[in-house]
Amino acid sequence: MDVNECYRLVLLATAKNVQDGYVSPDDFNLAMNNGQRMYLDYLLGEYQKYQPQRPIAVVEFGQNERIRESLAPLIYGANLFPNTTTGIAPFPSDYEYSDNMWGLYGFYNIKFIQQDRLDSYIHSSIDPIAENPVYLIQHEGFHFFPENFGSARLSYVRKPPSIVWGYVPDSNGIPVYNPATSQDPIWSETDILQIIARALQWLGVNLQFGMVVQYASQIKNEGQ
Amino acid sequence: MTRRQYIERIRRLIYGNQPPSEANITVGLVNNYLSDAIALAARTNYTDNLKLDGISAVNNSFYTTFKSLSVSSDEQFLWKITLPQIPLGLGETDGISTLIFKDSSSAQLSYPVILLSENQVSFQRGMRPIPNKLLAYPQGEFIYVMSTLMLSDYTANVTMISGGLSTDLDSTLNVPPDYFATMTEYLLKVLMIQKNQIQDVVSDGSDIVRST
């Protein structure tokens, strides 16, 4: 589904049209980009939905093929070459979430650990750190141990590229769709509907459309 | 079956699938516990043989020969060999079956050394030497050989109960297949204790389990 079709769907759902201008292209772009961020958060696993003693969201990244298929357009790979003194490799510029980390050669697992376990991992005699490298996540990026660790292969979820409904104003100042300055969503046909539902929720609140908010919530919570 | 194959089998049993990247039951950990499991299997075989045949023996399939172990001087007329692992505590010295010396400059092998228990060592000290026989006694991870010969010129070959080389995951697991079940049962029991343990996942400076 291209961005123009998305915009037409949003206008239809809000019972408005371009002439009335209630959902301007800029508002649409803002709402859609917010919607796709919310949907990404949902697919990665919303920790707000954790229960006591059970830190598992209803939907989580890697839960099954369906979830991974949805995120597939955002799953990228990168080779990392950490600084051999500090062991730090910066995040890729579009990095959002780690999927997995391996050694560059042979796909040997490099395990993510949290800071409070570092001592145990570094001083383990059963799984020596030299043969069982690990990494921390901190503000500079990935911090590998042992710090002279050479290279790694990262699979990660990237930030979704912006959805843009580009336009040029006609002689009356009404925006007309311009594919050249537009950017289509990267999501699949079914997933884009989830994003539109979330965008509608934002727009509904903004326009004070109770019906729209209710409709969007219904789609979000109960499915299409 | 190689150690690696057996370890993979155990890990897949524990995780119900291929282990994930977050797996805490690592290959190294299973390999570490495997030594205990092999010891248990050997002991079970030892007691099985005693019950069935009235003979205290461990099946040959459990044995491994470690070759070219170096010999060093420990005291006067006492020579020390470091074993790859502490022998199992079966019988008095049943953990080790054979110790022989090899001449590095030829293919010649010595006759097997007579292994004594610690109590026998005390008796032996007051006895005349046995002609053409070497006497030794295992102690922890060492074997001490009593001899006036210059044994450091030779290397030692030791045959002992051992599942094989624990440092080589591609080595064959020296356990008869009818004892895999005993080992698997033991490994699942201890490793599932770790797997099911409630973990302190909160880094709050106190050693109190707060959540899973």
Image (cartoon, coloured by chain):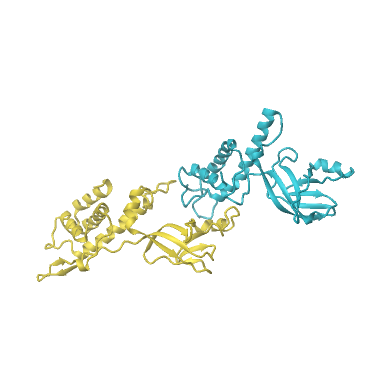
Chain colours: A yellow, B cyan
Q: Is residue A214 left or right of residue B199?
A: left
Residue B117 image position (x, y, % from top left): 79, 41
Residue ID at (44%, 67%): A90
Residue ID at (22%, 52%): A213
In the rendered image, is residue B147 in sight?
Answer: yes
Where is B105 relative to B16, above or below? below
> Which image quarter is the N terminus of chain A in?
bottom left
Residue B155 image position (x, y, % from top left): 74, 53
B53 or A72: which is nearer to us? B53
Residue ID at (40%, 65%): A92
In the rendered image, is residue B197 in sight?
Answer: no
Where is B15 relative to A183, above or below? above
Q: Is residue B203 left or right of residue B98?
A: left
Where is A49 relative to A115, above or below? above
Which image quadrant is residue A178 in? bottom left
Residue A49 image position (x, y, % from top left): 36, 49
Which image quadrant is residue A18 in? bottom left
B136 or A9: which is nearer to us? B136
